[in-house]
Image (cartoon, rainbow, N blue to C red):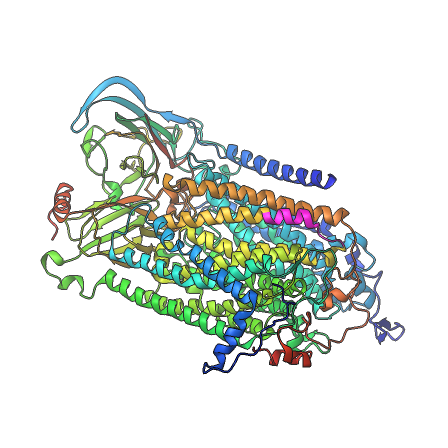
Amino acid sequence: MTMTEVPQEQPESPTNRPPSMHRFKNWMRRPYARHVMIWTVVIGFLLLPLCWLLLAAMNQTGAPASEIMQDIETTVFVFTLVSIPITAFVFAVLLYSLIGWKRISSDEPPMQESPAVFTNRIGVVLWTVVTSALAMFLAVWGMIELAQITANSYGTISANEQPGENQSVIVNVTGQQWVWTFAYPQTDGLVSDVLYLPVDKPVYFNVTSKDVIHNFWAVELGVKIDANPGAVTTAGVTPNKLGTFNIRCAELCGMHHAYMETEVRVVTQEQFDSWVREMGGGRTS
Amino acid sequence: MKKFLVILATVLAGVLFVGGIGAVSSISQEEPPVLAATLDGTTIDTPNNGTLPHATLDLSVYPNSSDAVPPPKEGPYQSAWLSGQPFYHPSTTIQVPANSVVTINFTQYDSGGQIYNPFFAHVHGTMDGTMDWNGKSVKNVKSDSVGHTFTVHQFPEASQPYFFLSIPLPMNAANAKTDKSGYPVDPQKISVTFVTGEAGTYVWNCEFPCGDEYQEFGGPMQTRGWMAGTFEVVA
Amino acid sequence: MSSVAPALVHSAEVPQPAQHGKPGGIMRRLNFGTGLLGGIGLATIAGVVTSQFVPSGYSSPVTFAPMEGEYVYLAVLLGWVIGFMAGMGAFVGPMRWLLGRENTHVDAEYMAGKDLGRSRYWKYTTDHKVVGIQYLIVTLIVFAFGGLLAMLIRTELGVTWAEVFSPAFYNSIIGTHGIAMIIAMIIAVSGPLGNFIVPMMIGARDMAYPRLNALSIWLLVAAVPCLVSSLFLGGIQDGWSAYQPLASQAPIGMLGYQMTIIVFALSTGVASVNLMTTILTMRAKGMSWSRTPIFVYGIFAAALMGLYAFPFYQYSQILSLSDRVFNTSFFNPLEGGSVWLYENLFWLLGHPEVYVILIPTTAVLMEILPVFMRKPLFSFNFAVAGIVGVVALRGLVWAHHMYMTGWAPAVNYPFMLSTEMISIPVGFLVLVVIGTLWRGTSWSRLPLMAVYAVIFNKMIGGVTGIYLSDVPADQYFHGSMFVVAHFHYMLMGAGFFGAMGGIAFYFPKMTGKILDERYGAIGLWTVFIGFQLTFGSMFVAGLQGQPRRVLQFDEQFAISNWISTIGAYTIGVGTLIFLGAIIFSWKDGPMVSGNPWASKSLEWQTPTPVPLENFAVLPVVTERPYNYGVPDPYDEELRAHDGDELESAGAR
């Protein structure tokens, strides 16, 4: 178990395997190398349920109600999966260092017990390559997902070009300490404190603030954008599930920040139209 | 053993310290006294909820404190920057009964002006979408003549019913005749009636910029007891 | 002048200017007491005079805010800082210089606290060891203050059924907790250890600019009351980030925050310049860059990054203060200002500052590891490369805090890339650490235990950081409790545990006593368990969708918040136990030799207590800093070699 145990293995008989395989095989003969590898795998499998547990926690209020939120959850899943091997390896080394390799708890410092390994070129190169590859993978994945979310948010065709039913709903979101208001410019001046959206229809948000910075967070729809005073920011989404979901303010905005909440009610097109008429907004143009 | 005692003492001292500071600050931050709507024994027919008991509540808004109307509370440090600011009187911690018809009678003594968001110049959440303003039934006031608003909104609890109520309180003219305390002789009288559902806790605040600092939303706007408070529907 | 005898300084004759009065001159009369007197005196005078000049009831024409309080508070704060520094004697040096009275050798020795006993800790003392201890005490005080506020926050969040504090007060405690902890963590390692240890570690007799060193600590001390006072004047109700325009709405306590930052940034700048100059110019003979301990690199990197970052913070707060008091409109969108300008300035500090905290704590654990593993630091060059990589990329990642602000959606792509890239050099540091653990025989003592805790926390903090660096995932996590848990794992998990380890490690050098192993370990592991409970369940709350900085939330978040609060109290108890261990060991602990850990680096070769000027004869460095261990039994061919060649023959 300890490093003082000098290896007994004899040089192998020559085979046609490449020398790196020899080296690896020799290295794996060392007990600690085998153990750390096994522990890495075990810890990795123990961590694996996290991939689903994270999503379960995210879905506690309700499953994704839009394509965007679906993409976000996929990203979280993939990121968890990709970071598990490295995490498991580090934890395995950490644990093995605590209970595997030799440990001394004398009061006097032990003198010169450990092998003087100054570096290990293969280890360094391998680590650099693996971590860089993972980081690059995550960056590329993130960019592709971001591009996809941007496309899902804003679509490829502008609102004016879409005829009839497929036209998007425009909502002007205004944050004010500490109430959200939602104006529907396509109606006759309808303004509401609750966000009503028709299902399966793209919606564009023009978000702004009357005073301080707020953050418009439609949780299950996966929409999050700051409401800035003196500027309009945009976001978009196509809700694909009927139901009532949460809107929260995610940027500290003063005393009643915690209470700056409201609901988004995703309803059918007919219900939406009748709601607009009922609220005196005329017809949706 | 001695070590253990020293450390135990340290821990205890720390706990006492934390507890002490917590207690002191929670006392100094005490909420204004509860102002409950009183059931007046009558019942009222509602269009959707059947016949419900009726309760009433009186609230006033003053532009500043005076000898006649004391300021809400004299916190040790607040008086320095909240004196001379408008406030709701007699309290901002409001309780109304659940499943009832509640009438709030506002008496508004303050002046006013242009509101940022015309949405809050409209009446929202009352029984028939109107309010009674000096005897007239109106749905909104002009957005350039709002004095204050009384806007009750959501508390982050999914288990309680959604509740939203926003009442614009019209302003008094700047040249209105005033009494010797400086308050208008003929204040604006507003009366609203709304239906409450199941019990729940909400907060309310004024949406008219009547404080100081940036966008006049600091000071009293961000202090319970002045222009904001809690609104509890109790069973 | 010719009558003045030259002084004998380290067996060299140095010509001396004329001696005026007793050694030290007026500095003999000045100490912390006169500082307080001067500060309170000048603050009172400034306040009274200002209130006379401001017309009663004068309010700002722009915001209608009554301005008298603002002007008076600003004057009081300025009066306090200037008066305190004057009372401490910060202006005596420049005054002497103006009068042409150069310091003599005996003056300088008096200033360094020679033969002053304990009172030197209460004076404007230039000795780097005194400054280090002063930094340690200030860190502990600020940390205790911030920790107390953390307990209050968790109390509020644990009581899910009611408001314990009014929302305004709650907001001000989260803001004050944030900035107090940020200050404490920034100075936690660079302050006490950077000042006390670094000069000894590089074989120098003191810092390059001893008087600037004293200036930096006493400026810091002057900043602390500014911060505490704001809590009583309405507080910092807008989080430690003090985003505009919310900060313009806050009560006058906001000025306390702004003044704290302005003074603190000055202190940090002074300290950074001092540390960098010291490290660049005063390393012992023979201490080439490859023989310089990694901690020195870490401190140098922190100083460099601090010098880059803190001016942004200072500017942002000066502009903010000017918006507030002088009606300018840098950040006021109504008047054409930009809130994004503030956010950019703030995060140009905000992200490098994270590395200002993390790099020294990582470096200190890299200093601890070889000693307790009895093993060389794995791949020293790689560690340096990691630090250099972080320093190089630190200024390119700030806008990942602004993904969701809508400032410039297109730059989310490059900032996502740069943020993912910075995980590569950080990964180097992880490899160095686990490479040093690899096959090591561990000598399990308190500092090493802290190192294990740090690695564990840092791994979790690092991995969760990957989610936040990614724009799509950040679209869910931004502004949620997940972020709070993540940066606590980083700053507290690495910073606080690293500081505990660092203090435990250097305690024998700083105090001559050894930190009580048993109670230190009990404290450490109590904190560790509490820490996992608190911030582990905070991750869950964030995943569930709880926004940060709220005092009331949906009951679905209640369970995770209860666990979190229980954990927080556990941390509190553990910290107090650790603190008790520090105080007890400092007072009554057993004396130890100068080098109880049998370390090979320079600072441990000095006697304890360390004499003034550290080394009677300046050392000459002849080997690498981490030559521990025995030849690798697995490696037959290496037995033929020795010393520096080991590295080149590394790959097996």
> In this view of the protein, which residue sits in the foreground, A84 or C146?
A84
Measured as percent of width and height from the top left, residue A277 is found at 12, 44
User: For this view, does B153 lie left or right of residue C308?
Assistant: left
Please tell me which residue is depicted at 84% across the width and 69% down the height of the picture: C18
Magenta portion: prevailing SS class: helix
Give the farthest residue toward the top. B41
In the figure, residue C602 lies in which quadrant? bottom right
Q: Is residue C180 above or below residue C595?
A: above
Q: Position of residue A276 (x, y in %)?
A: 15, 45
Q: Is residue C519 magenta?
A: yes
Residue C187 can be seen in this image: yes
Outermost residue on the front side: it is A13
- Which quarter of the figure is the N terminus of chain C placed in? bottom right
Instruction: Please tell me in which quadrant of the rendered image residue B165 appears.
Output: top left
Q: Which of C630 and C297 is in front in this view?
A: C630
**Residue at x 56% of width, y 77% of height:** C652
The boundaries of the magenta stretch are C513-525
Residue C444, position in %: x, y? 66, 56
Q: Where does residue B104 sit, x and y in percent of width and height?
A: 28, 28
- Using the image as rendered, state which of residue C359 and residue A14 is in the foreground: A14
Residue drawn 73% across the image and 55% down it: A107
The residue under the point 34% across, 67% down is: A141
The image quadrant that residue B218 belongs to is: top left
Count the labels in the image: 0
User: Magenta segment: does it hold C636?
Assistant: no
